[in-house]
Amino acid sequence: MTRLKKTRIQGISLAVISLVGLLLMAHGNTASAADAQEVQVGFGETDITPDVKGEKPVWLAGYGPGRRATGVHDPLMARCLVLGDGKEKIALVSVDLIGLQYPNVKEIRKGLADFKYVLVSSTHNHEGPDVVGIWGRGFFSRGVDDDYVASVVSKVVELVKKTAENLSPATAAYGTASDETLVGDSRKPVAKDGVLRVIKFTKAGGQETAGLLVQWNCHPEAMGSKNTLVTADFPYATVAKLKEQHKCPILYMSGAVGGLMAPPDGLIKNNEGKVLEEGDFEYCRLYGEAVADLATKATAAVEPIGLTPFTVSAKPIAVPVTNPMYRLARVARILRREGRIWEGDFQKLGEMVSDETIDKPTAVETEVAYLRLGEVHVASIPGELYPELIYGTFQEPAEPNADFPDAPLEPTVESILPGKKWLLFGLANDEIGYIIPRRQWDSSPPFAYGRKSSQYGEINSCSPEVAPIIMQALKLRVADVAAPQVQVPK
Ligand SMILES: [Zn+2]
C-alpha cells in the first residue's frame, strides 16, 4: 500500500512539474519563477562620526543638556539600501542620530532628484551629537553644529549616489521573529512591538546573501545619560554581529520606539551570570547581539516575496505645536526650524510664522508616507509612534483621569496597511517627538494611575493632536495608492 501511494504522489509531482514547465514555455521564458521577482539592489555605508577633538564641542543628544562628548567608542554611520526596478530607484537610508529633521532630509533629496523616493530614518541614537537643538551646553543654548549637519547631508547624498552606481540583481524574502522580553516599557499602560522584521536579499542565481534590512523597535539608549563617548549604542553591536554571521551588509532601521521602548532591565547577563545594567558597554554589546540573534532567527523564517513594482505616496502635512517648551525653545532660537501658522487642517500648510505672527497657533511641517514595494507595505512615520497605534492594544477602559478619556481611538497601522507583510520606519524623514494615542494624553491634573505628576512623554510631544493626525494621514496615503493619485515631494 505504501509503495502504491508513493508511486501515485510521484505521478502527481511529475504532472505538476510538466504543467509548470509548459506554463513557463508559454511565456517564452525558460528561467525559474523566482527570477521574475528579481530586484536591483545595492547596499552602502559611510562614516558620519563628529570630530570630538576639534575646536567646537560636540553635545550629546537624548537626555538632559550639558553632556559634552569626550571621545569616540565606535563610529556613527549612515547606511543605505538602494532598490531599482530597472526604471526607477528608491533609497532607504538610516543614520545613527537622534533624529535628523525634515528640512535636512529635503536638502538630501535635492541632491538625489533622479530618485523616485528617498527615505531617511534616524535610529534615534541617544549617544550621538545634537541635530535638533535642545541638548546644548545648558537649557538656553543650542547644541547643533550646523556645519556637522551640512556634512551629514552631503555625505548621505554621496553615499546614495555611489551605492546606486553598483546595483546588482537579487531576490528578496521577508520574515519576522518576536521577543517581547527584549523591550522594556517604562510608561503605563504596557504596550510593545516585540516583532523584528527582516528582508533578506540573495544574489540572483546563487545562495550568497546580498544584504539584510532589519527593523527593530527600541530606543538606542543602552549607554544611558552618564556616558560621554560617542557611540551608535546597541545597533553598533547588532550590525557588527549580523555582518559576522551573514557575511553581508546590514541596514538597521528603528520602528515604533514611542511609549518608551527601551532595552530591558534584569535580562542581560555576562558570562558569570551577573545582571548587567544601562551605561555599561558590555551590557550595550550583549543587548545588541541579542537583537542580532533575533534577526538571524527571522532570516531563518523568511518567505520569498516580490519587491516590485514600486508605488509611493508621500505628502507634507501640518502638525500643530502647543507644547509650551517647544514654543519657548523656538522663541529662544534653540529650535530654529521654521514654523507655519496652524490653519486647523493638517492638509493645509499655513504661511510661515514671522515676528508679527509668532503669537498665532503654530504648526510644524512634516511628512507621512506609504510605500508599496511589490508585496511589502511600508509605513513611514516622522516620529516616535506608540505601539498601541500599531496593533490597537489600547487600554480599555481608558484611564478616567487622562485628559481625553473619551477621545475616539485612532485607526491602527495593522488596520490601515492592506497586507500582512509590512515594515514600519519610525523617525522617518523627521523627528517630531512622541506620537501618543489621544486617550492616553495626560498633562493636566488629576493624573492617571493615581500619580502625583504626569508620566514622561507629553513633554516631548508637539500636541495631543499628533496621533490622530499621523494615523489619518497614513490612511490617506494608503488610499492615494489605491486611488492612484500619488505625489512625491521633491
Ligand atoms: Zn525617544
Image (cartoon, rainbow, N blue to C red):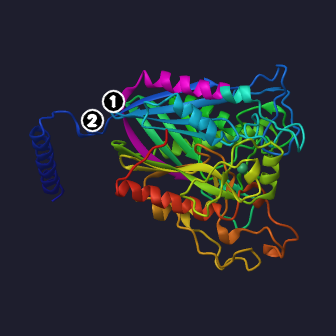
Residue labelled with disc 1: 204
Q: Position of residue 477 (x, y in %)?
A: 45, 55
Quadrant position of the N terminus in the picture: bottom left
C-alpha distance separating marks 1 and 2: 8 Å
Marks 1 and 2 close (CB-CB < 8 Å): yes
Magenta-highlighted residues: 151-179
Place residue 419 in its image quadrant: bottom left
Kind of residue indicated by mark 2? Asp
Q: What count of labels does the image hold?
A: 2
Kind of residue indicated by mark 1? Ala
Classify 299 as above or below 181. Answer: above
Helix, strand or loop under label 2: helix
- Residue appearing at x 49%, y 38% in the figure: 490
Q: Is mark 1 within 8 Å of ligand 1?
A: no
Could you say which is closer to the camera, residue 223 or residue 50? Answer: 50
Classify 55 as above or below 449. Answer: above
Q: Position of residue 435 (x, y in %)?
A: 65, 58
Helix, strand or loop under label 1: loop
Q: Position of residue 349 (x, y in %)?
A: 58, 53
Q: Which mark is residue 35?
A: 2
Q: Is 369 part of what is drawn in magenta?
A: no
Q: Is residue 280 visible?
A: yes
The tag earlier along the polypeptide, 1 or 2, is 2
- Residue appearing at x 55%, y 26% in the figure: 157
- Residue appearing at x 73%, y 58% in the figure: 360
